[in-house]
Image (cartoon, rainbow, N blue to C red):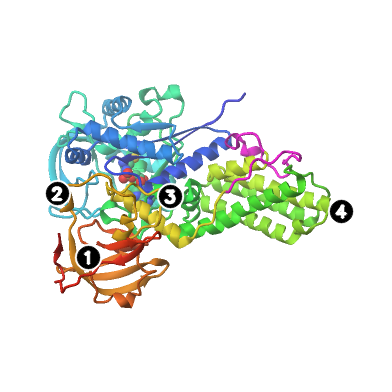
Amino acid sequence: MPQKEKFYLTTPIYYTNGLPHIGHTYTTVVADVIRRYKRMRGYDVVMTTGTDEHGVNVERAAKKAGIPESEYVAKMADAWRALWDELGIPADEFVRTTDLKHVRTVQWLFKLCKENGYVYKGHYTGQYCIYDNAFVNDTKPGDNCPDCGRPLETITEENFFFKLSSFQKPLLDFYKKNPDFIQPDTRRNEIISFVEGGLKDLSITRTTIRWGIPVPGEEPHVFYVWFDALTAYLSAVGGPDFEKRGMWPADLHLVGKDIIRFHTVYWPAFLMAAMLPVPKQVWAHGWFLMDAAKMSKSKGNVVLPRPIVNMLGMDALRYFLLRDVVFGQDGNFSYDALVTRYNSDLANGLGNLASRTAALIEKNFAGKIPKPAAFKPQDEVLGKEAQNAIGEVLENFDKLSFARALETIWTVIAAADKYLTSEQPWALGNSEADQSRKATVLWTTAELLRIVVALLFPVLPDSAAKVWTLLGQSDALGKFELDGLRWGQLAPGASLGKAQTLFPRVDKTEAIERIESMANEELNPTPATPAPAASAPAVSGTAAAAAAAPAVSDKIGIEDFTKVEMRVGQIKTAERIVGADKLLKLTVDIGTEIRQICAGIAQYYEPESLIGRKVAVVVNLAPRKLRGVESNGMIVAASVGPEGRPVLTGFHEEVEVGARLK
Ligand code: MSP
């Protein structure tokens, strides 16, 4: 058997001072799609992800948590790994920068660079962003970080320097010789002009940080975060013994656009200095934005993967991430677009075609793939369309043009829908001619579906495999070789598998409310309320919803109660929120300020009837977003009857706005 060609790809290794949001999920999902795709094209694939665990941020976070750094990062790494497992995208190699094999690789790489004359000791004074772990050029003392906006610190220290300046020409020559090294082309041009502008030597160690990999014999020097982090790609596949494993150099590093410079300038320069093979390609994707800004927990605009997966399934999230944004560009994340696509493309498109076809075969051919009779031109046209799609889709997957590939597949699905509607196999009778025609039409549709799901497997592994089994295919779809995929291979006589609902249609408003409510709970867990399951009622902005949750058994002490700050508020304005029929957007005077609060009372209160009304407000609740609208506080209401109708609180005497409820 000929040896398989290898393909090694990586995601960035993620910082451990936060948990994964949709931006991180995006990179890992894309890596998983490529991994599955390459395996179906006959490659021996290894995909690496991991955690970047050193630096001052970790020191601080561990201190805040009151635990040693090692314990803190172990917990965080477990959480990252567990989430990838839960989402069905575990890496083949999960590398932690605190792993011994990684520590050894970093020290070895440094030794090689030093022996080859590319490392020297010097002093460095600069403005340093402790949040981004980087010195920031072109800034002066007192400036804020241009990336994150937080204050910079002036730092002078003895460092080891890497002679990056020696690599200007080698890098430019390398980019020229390997025009596909940096993708997409716009990024390539940016990097080339950056390198043409001149490269300064780079400080690669610190003495001000404790939590890092020690430079052997040079303590207290520890490695600077990028020399440490980038090397993880190599430690994951053998480190100093990389030749034995046979995976290095990486074929593809997937990164976000913010870290492209580190991957396309520093990383190849470190490797060149050590005389090691340089990766083949770095692909920078754009960001998923929320309200036109990059997501961050401090801005309160992060989108979490788990609530979406609980509500719509992992395949729906994967599909949306790849279909809605052109790979390489930024895209705005919106729950509205997510659910709309789910209903139109997955529930009504693929899901409907699969269940319709299976039901017709079940009914007319006792659940066995029928044998086609003579083909008519319209059958052949459809067959050609599916056959042509194979080449087009593979070509687009090769270029990482996922949105294009999916668009092509959905054109074929739409053509099949139209074909069924015009051929109307359900309207044909039981004569021999009609039976033959029915057989031909249903075989044609089933064959198209087989091709569609074979192509879709890298993106929709669960649902594609379900349809594959539904069509009576017994081999594992993930092992199917796409190079052998052709129109006409569907063997008649195979028994259909068990019918399953693939993508049940959802009510958009309700689905979004549930996702947001689960996300709020995950971001601001209330110890008293258990995390809502997928089937929990939609809750939003009122205490009525919380009251509808199961009773709390443990009593709390007064000190817990006093943590909740409730005040009398007066509603100033009230309006409905477009697309959210349960929510009202209120502005409420709480004595010291006017707050915007969303409340899930729109089905029970007319906005106008609320103006001037005095209500109890929880004022020290962390702000949350409901349907994209900021809600800063919670209106207290009783929850009445089985459906939990909210009834607002009131006062029987005149009370001052802002008075505290005790
Ligand atoms: N630890 C470094 C990477 C070291 S790689 C040797 C790091 N970590 S990170 O956790 O901050 O970011 C990891 C990746 O997530 C980056 O590629 C970044 O671009 C990506 N994303 C973070 N937020 C994102 C979005 N909102 N959208 C898409 N990707 C984004 O940087």
The disc label shown at residue 534, or none: 3
Please tell me which residue lies in front, 312 or 133: 312
- Of pointers 4 and 2, the one earlier in the residue sequence: 4
**Badge 1 vs badge 3, beta-carbon distance below 8 Å:** no
Q: Which residues are magenta?
A: 473-501
- Of pointers 2 and 3, the one earlier in the residue sequence: 3
Element on which disc 3 rests: loop
Question: Which class describes the residues within 10 Å of circle 1: few (<14), some (14-19), or many (20+)?
Answer: many
Element on which disc 4 rests: loop
**Badge 2 vs badge 3, beta-carbon distance below 8 Å:** no
State the image quarter where residue 213 is shown.
top left
Kindly report the secondary structure that dominates the magenta region of the rendered protein: loop
Q: What is the CA distance from the residue labelled 4 to the residue labelled 3? A: 49 Å
Identity of the amino acid at label 3?
A: Ala
Identity of the amino acid at label 4?
A: Ser
Question: Which class describes the residues within 10 Å of circle 2: few (<14), some (14-19), or many (20+)?
Answer: few
Left or right: 447, with 45 as reference point = right
Tag nearer the camera, 1 or 3 = 1
Question: Which class describes the residues within 10 Å of circle 3: few (<14), some (14-19), or many (20+)?
Answer: some
Identity of the amino acid at label 2?
A: Glu
- Of pointers 2 and 1, the one earlier in the residue sequence: 2
Q: Which residue corresponds to mark 4?
A: 431
The disc label shown at residue 616, or none: 1
Left or right: 612, with 7 as reference point = left
Identity of the amino acid at label 1?
A: Ala
Residue 165, image x and y in percent?
27, 40
Q: Is residue 483 magenta?
A: yes
Q: What is the CA distance from the residue labelled 4 to the residue labelled 2? A: 81 Å
Q: Which residue corresponds to mark 2?
A: 559
State the image quarter where residue 271 is shown.
top left
Q: Residue at x 72, y 51 (%)?
A: 360
